[in-house]
Amino acid sequence: MSESPRPGYEQARDELAEVVRQLEQGGASLEQSLALWERGEELATICQQWLDGAKARLDSALAKGPEQDL
């Protein structure tokens, strides 16, 4: 069984928001709630990885300084 490709930041963020909405709404079984929680944890990690990568790229660009971008 192959893993699906990692979603982009916006897709992961939107799916995470939907997971949170479903959990807050209630009414799911314990098993469904645990599955939603686990998916939410995965999505939060994916979002954090995207943000960390963006910050590293920004830090790298700022460290080069404007004269090196020419």
Image (tube, grey):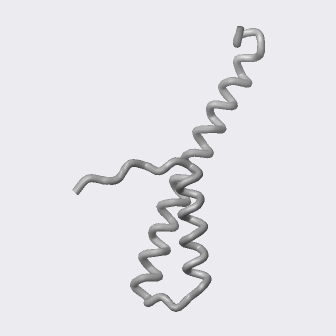
Residue 52 to residue 27: above or below: above
Q: Is residue 4 left or right of residue 43?
A: left
Quadrant containing the C terminus is top right
Q: Residue at x 42, y 82 (%)?
A: 32
Residue 11 to residue 64: above or below: below
Residue 18 to residue 46: above or below: below
Which residue appears farthest toward the left when viewing the image? 1
Q: Position of residue 21 (x, y in %)?
A: 60, 76
Quadrant for residue 62, please give it: top right
Which residue appears farthest toward the right when viewing the image? 66
Q: Residue at x 44, y 90 (%)?
A: 29
Q: Position of residue 40 (x, y in %)?
A: 51, 67
Q: Is residue 69 left or right of residue 35?
A: right
Q: Residue at x 57, y 45 (%)?
A: 50
Q: Residue at x 68, y 24 (%)?
A: 61
Q: Position of residue 55 (x, y in %)?
A: 66, 38
Residue 57 to residue 38: above or below: above
Quadrant containing the N terminus is bottom left
Quadrant for residue 15, please give it: bottom right
Q: How many marks?
A: 0
